[in-house]
Image (tube, rainbow, N blue to C red):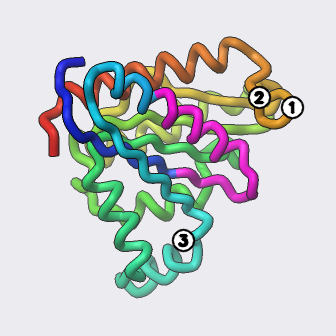
Amino acid sequence: MTAAGPRSIVVVSAGLGQPSATRLLADRLAAATERHLRAGGAQPSVTVIELREHARDLTDHLLTGFPSPALQASIDAAIAADGLIAVSPIFNASYSGLFKLFFDVVERDGLAGTPVLIAATGGTARHSLALEHAIRPLFAYLGAAVVPTAVYAASEDWGRAGIVADGSLVERIERGATELAAAVAARPAG
């Protein structure tokens, strides 16, 4: 990583519960990315967008074409980010409707060239392919620069109190965060 200075990382979490395994994974990815950026001399700021807080506003915006001020601020933050971490629970072999709804209201070229780390959570490891057959194509369509590593966490990857039970999840988090931090650092600031 060569570029120092301020860098904004926006985390979009589509978890429905509170607490949420999706948010837990999002927080782990954000912390690792922030650590790697700091090690490279950057001064990262992390903003978390909890989509569950915008559920009604997203529906209203889709129907009327007018976002609420809070939703517009979240859309603007995602578009202006130097890097994006996008995490969805997997339902019926794909991302959640709330996740899709948010990215449906982002303008088509709004994320063009933005480095994105994609991640998902689910009940079983069998759903991990949803990252490759659903989430990666969504961001490719939006023109984002998705990093190679996608991070999936199944229920068995977590231990008590949200502690990672398996070292392979830690390795995937670190690899994805390293790739995102490098892609963010390689971009011109601002």
Is-magenta flag for residue 160?
no
Q: Residue at x 77, y 28 (%)?
A: 163
Left or right, 159 with reference to 33 = right
Magenta region: 13-32
The residue identified by callout 1 is 160
Q: Residue at x 70, y 48 (%)?
A: 91
Residue 98, image x, y percentages = 58, 62
- Determine which quarter of the picture holds residue 68: bottom left
Are the two marked residues, 2 and 1, in contact with CB atoms closer than 8 angstroms?
A: yes
Query: Label 2 to label 3, Cα distance in Å?
Result: 28 Å
Which residue extends farthest left?
Answer: 188
Is-magenta flag for residue 23?
yes
Name the magenta segment's main secondary structure.
helix
Residue 89 numbered tag = none
Left or right, 181 with reference to 161 = left
Residue 89, image x, y percentages = 66, 46
For mark 2, does the 10 Å Cα neighbourhood hold few (<14), some (14 to 19), or many (20 or more) residues? few
- Determine which quarter of the picture holds residue 71: bottom left
The residue identified by callout 2 is 163
Kindly identify the amino acid type of the residue bearing the numbered disc 1: Arg
Closest to the camera, between mark 2 and mark 3, is 2
